[in-house]
Image: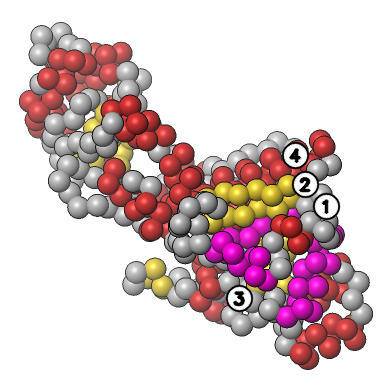
């Protein structure tokens, strides 16, 4: 991935996107597109901007970098320009109308009904740019009684069934940390914008797009949802000590580290696993020689595997498993992940030379393009940092008009 190089021409170089989004799901979508070269103009409220700027802690860990930069905001909003404008005023709206006329796409993730109230909905904006690709991102979809209900990541975990799918039988519901619903929805949103832009490139026709967090989280749980449709019941959680397939399970090693086995073709891998574990006698054991028998005797088999894994440290097992063509992984905590050579060598986490902070680590882009690589061309903007550039250089406002808008508080 290119770093600190404003000369890199990404695949989306020349595409301009007006980004009126906050927090995570929307900004992460335009983060992807910005890394790919698109010009992202982030529209913010002059009174504080994107609320993510002010999120100072995650649990008890501070998110603030030196000089008052917020770490999550810094990652999600790099390669963007900040336009701080009061959209409750007619003059503020006129700025957006003028900008939309010179842009390819507009994306927003406010509660259903907000855009209509402010005259920033698709029907209004397409009058200023008939070929505009306009993307909405919301919580629960555009229809039904929950259409206008506010939603954040944890609420979608609950509504999508995910909290009841994670964990073991009889455990309380579990919420995955880390805004997984936001991040996953952002990928769907970025994909939808690109499909819309591609279609317009072919046909010249713009359109309105809608992506919901709930719909996305159902889609990524397709296996679980289809199971429940076919079985006419919820997919059951299972006990680690009594799985339907002991070769898709996790086991604790002597040093307290854990190993994950991921063999969805267990009969194929059973002989090699027995060989790696020193359990060759089990290969043709009439209790375990195929999947159905292992399922019928899973509690007993897991007990054997637990005792076997407990005889060696995790690294010892990793060295043994590396000699066999098995599907496995150490179960890592996040501190291991951020120091993992595999992660660092592939630039999934990368060094970035921030113009104020110096060398820091940021998330890389997990997509590689041989001719049009992703890049970090600029850090996340200060609130309203690019007001003059957008109004004067892009929209052609005079300096006097720009200063007058500043004097009225319509722009910073």
Numbered tag placed on residue 307 in the rendering = none
Q: Residue at x 73, y 80 (%)?
A: 89
Question: Whole-Å distance between the Cαs marked 3 and 2?
Answer: 29 Å
- Taking the image as shown, residue 295 lies to the left or right of residue 200, namely left
Q: Earlier in the sequence, mark 4 or mark 1?
A: 1
Bin the neighbour count of mark 1 within 10 Å (Cα to Cα): few under 14, some 14-19, many 20 and up. Answer: some
Bin the neighbour count of mark 4 within 10 Å (Cα to Cα): few under 14, some 14-19, many 20 and up. Answer: few
Q: Earlier in the sequence, mark 3 or mark 1?
A: 3
Front-lying residue, 84 or 5: 84
- Residue 173 on the magenta segment: no
- Disc 1 marks which residue? 130
Vertical order, 364 against 397 (above or below) = above
- Disc 4 marks which residue? 198
Foreground label between 4 and 1:
1
- Disc 2 marks which residue? 206
Q: Earlier in the sequence, mark 4 or mark 3?
A: 3
- Disc 3 marks which residue? 49
Q: Earlier in the sequence, mark 3 or mark 2?
A: 3
Please report the bounds of the magenta region as a residue range: 89-118
Question: Whole-Å distance between the Cαs marked 2 and 1?
Answer: 6 Å
Q: Residue at x 16, y 21 (%)?
A: 295
Q: Earlier in the sequence, mark 2 or mark 4?
A: 4
């Amino acid at each position: 991935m290119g770093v600190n190089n404003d000369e890199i021409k990404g695949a989306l170089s020349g595409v301009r996107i007006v980004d009126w989004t906050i927090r995570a799901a929307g900004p992460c979508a335009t983060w992807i597109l910005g890394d790919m070269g698109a010009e992202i103009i982030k529209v913010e409220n002059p009174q504080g901007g994107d609320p993510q700027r002010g999120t100072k802690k995650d649990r008890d860990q501070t998110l603030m970098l030196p000089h008052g930069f917020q770490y999550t905001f810094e990652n999600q909003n790099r390669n963007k320009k900040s336009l701080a404008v009061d959209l409750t005023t007619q003059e503020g709206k006129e700025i957006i109308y003028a900008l939309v006329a010179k842009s390819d796409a507009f994306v927003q993730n406010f509660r259903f009904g907000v855009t209509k109230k402010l005259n920033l909905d698709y029907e209004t904006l397409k009058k200023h740019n008939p070929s505009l690709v306009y993307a909405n991102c919301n919580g629960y979809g555009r229809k039904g009684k929950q259409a206008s209900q506010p939603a954040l990541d944890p609420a979608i975990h609950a509504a999508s069934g995910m909290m009841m799918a994670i964990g073991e039988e009889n455990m309380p519901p579990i919420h995955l940390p880390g805004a997984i619903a936001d991040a996953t929805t952002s990928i769907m949103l970025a994909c939808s914008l690109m499909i819309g832009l591609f279609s317009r490139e072919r046909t010249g026709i713009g359109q309105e797009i809608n992506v919901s967090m709930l719909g996305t989280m159902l889609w990524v749980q397709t296996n679980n949802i289809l199971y429940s449709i076919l079985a006419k019941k919820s997919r059951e959680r299972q006990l680690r000590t009594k799985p339907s397939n002991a070769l898709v399970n996790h086991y604790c090693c002597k040093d307290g580290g854990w190993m994950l086995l991921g063999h969805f073709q267990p009969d194929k891998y059973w002989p090699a696993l027995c060989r790696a574990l020193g359990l060759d006698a089990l290969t043709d054991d009439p209790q375990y020689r195929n999947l159905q028998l292992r399922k019928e005797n899973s509690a007993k088999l897991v007990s054997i595997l637990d005792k076997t894994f407990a005889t060696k440290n995790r690294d010892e097992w990793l060295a043994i498993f590396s000699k066999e063509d098995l599907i496995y992984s150490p179960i890592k905590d996040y501190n291991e992940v951020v120091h993992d050579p595999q992660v660092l060598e592939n630039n999934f986490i990368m060094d970035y030379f921030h113009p104020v902070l110096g060398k820091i680590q940021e998330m890389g882009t997990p997509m590689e393009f041989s001719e049009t690589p992703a890049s970090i061309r600029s850090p996340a903007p200060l609130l309203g940092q690019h007001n003059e550039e957008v109004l004067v250089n892009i929209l052609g406002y005079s300096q006097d008009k720009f200063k007058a808008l500043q004097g009225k508080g319509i722009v910073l």
